[in-house]
């Protein structure tokens, strides 16, 4: 068996989204660039504030705190405790994500589902022991998959017997949401955080220009297919090239279709979701969490269903869909802030909010 796990942020261009910075330092503000490892990825930050060192320390501590609570692989986490016992009193962060997951599952007809944890485990994702399960192995696990097997009442969470959860599909987006609030409280004038394929940019760069976020070419980890220019926005990408293994010449990626338990074969290579802060349909204002969930859900749906879903949602978010036919579909809301890279094998199409 040949396998190749690509963690999204081992380098900036190895992530789905690469941040092209160029920050300067003003007389009153300190600008600090730092990286650290958490949530199974390298996290990059650029922070401009009166005390950027203190803000960075708070940022790092908050993400490490969330990792300890939400990790499915940490035996001491709240998620692991819930998976072991089937019921638990959880903290506010875990409860917020369980509530969000239930909402996203209902909104996407199950395309986003955190109860795929047993499926991820049987495939060996999150470990070095990859395995292509038989159809029978998957059939035995599928009855335990589905949001209907999970209930939440206040801080009391319960899972049906055999059901387990993995919050990896929304934890980084949620972390970005909390960091956005932390930065606002600390009067960060300009900032960027990249948690692998999850990016949040605060304000503009110090020179007043928009942050430039490069969307990676799914076929080439050293190239990008275009640049987004964003302010006060989240951009999250899910792709079949981030985490995968190969066996007998076939690539098996980690984005599983909850319907059959297999890597989604939807005709898409990657999905990028973009939301301006405060503009997502999430009922609790979790814009980054919403982007994280939708990047997975739309990947599972495929292009046609994803576009219909976007239109039916009132077009309150934007997307970039990269198909396996080398077509890049871009929602109309990004037309003015996305520029394609020169050359390359892709054709680009703008998707209108309404059908003609």
Image (tube, rainbow, N blue to C red):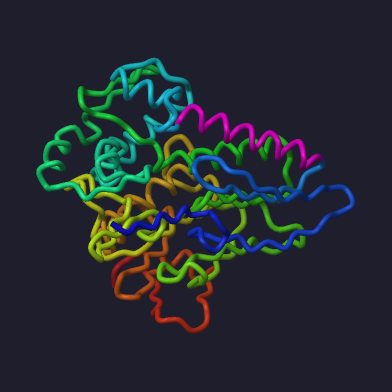
Q: Nearer the viewer, residue 282 or 259?
A: 259
Left/right placement of residue 211 relative to residue 83 reads right
59 drawn magenta: yes
Left/right placement of residue 148 relative to residue 59 reads left
* Residue at the image position 25 percent from the left and 48 percent from the top: 131
179 drawn magenta: no
Our reading of the magenta stretch's main secondary structure is helix
Point out residue 100 in the picture as x, y percentages from the top left corner: 39, 35
* Residue at the image position 55 percent from the left and 63 percent from the top: 13
How many numbered marks have been drawn onto this rendered protein structure? 0
* Residue at the image position 38 percent from the left and 72 percent from the top: 328
Q: Nearer the viewer, residue 120 or 113?
A: 120
Q: Quadrant of residue 99?
A: top left
Point out residue 277 in the picture as x, y percentages from the top left corner: 55, 48
Point out residue 119 in the picture as x, y percentages from the top left corner: 25, 41
The extreme bottom residue here reads 343
Point out residue 103 in the picture as x, y percentages from the top left corner: 33, 36
- Magenta residues span 51-70
Q: Nearer the viewer, residue 240 or 190?
A: 240
Left/right placement of residue 60 relative to residue 301 reads right
In which quadrant is the N terminus drawn?
bottom left
In which quadrant is the C terminus drawn?
bottom left
The extreme front residue here reads 1
* Residue at the image position 72 percent from the left and 36 percent from the top: 186
């Amino acid at each position: 068996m040949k396998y190749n796990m690509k963690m999204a942020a081992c380098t900036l261009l190895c992530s789905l989204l690469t941040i092209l910075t160029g920050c300067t330092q003003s007389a009153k503000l300190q600008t600090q660039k730092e990286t650290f490892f958490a949530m199974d990825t390298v996290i990059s930050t650029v922070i401009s504030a009166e005390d950027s060192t203190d803000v960075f320390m708070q940022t790092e501590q908050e993400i490490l705190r969330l990792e300890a609570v939400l990790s499915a692989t940490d035996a001491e986490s709240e998620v692991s405790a819930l998976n072991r016992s089937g019921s638990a009193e959880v903290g506010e962060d875990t409860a917020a994500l369980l509530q969000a997951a239930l909402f996203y599952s209902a909104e996407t007809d199950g395309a986003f589902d955190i109860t795929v944890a047993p499926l991820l485990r049987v495939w060996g994702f999150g470990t070095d022991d990859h395995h292509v399960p038989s159809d029978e192995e998957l059939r035995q696990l599928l009855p335990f998959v589905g949001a209907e097997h999970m209930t939440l009442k206040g801080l009391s969470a319960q899972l049906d017997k055999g059901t387990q959860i993995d919050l990896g599909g929304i934890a980084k987006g949620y972390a970005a949401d909390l960091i956005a609030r932390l930065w606002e409280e600390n009067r960060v004038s300009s900032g960027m955080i990249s948690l692998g394929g999850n990016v949040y940019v605060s304000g503009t760069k110090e020179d007043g220009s928009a942050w430039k976020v490069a969307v990676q070419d799914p076929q080439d980890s050293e190239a990008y297919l275009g640049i987004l220019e964003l302010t006060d926005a989240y951009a999250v990408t899910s792709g079949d090239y981030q985490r995968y293994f190969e066996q007998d010449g076939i690539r098996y990626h980690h984005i599983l279709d909850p319907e059959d338990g297999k890597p989604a074969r939807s005709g898409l290579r990657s999905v990028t979701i973009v939301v301006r802060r405060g503009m997502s349909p999430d009922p609790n204002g979790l814009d980054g969490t919403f982007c994280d969930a939708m990047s997975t859900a739309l990947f599972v749906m495929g292009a046609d269903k994803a576009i219909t879903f976007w239109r039916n949602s009132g077009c309150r978010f934007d997307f970039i869909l990269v198909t396996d036919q080398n077509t890049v579909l871009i929602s109309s809301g990004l037309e003015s802030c996305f520029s394609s890279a020169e050359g390359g094998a892709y054709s680009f199409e703008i998707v209108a909010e309404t059908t003609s």
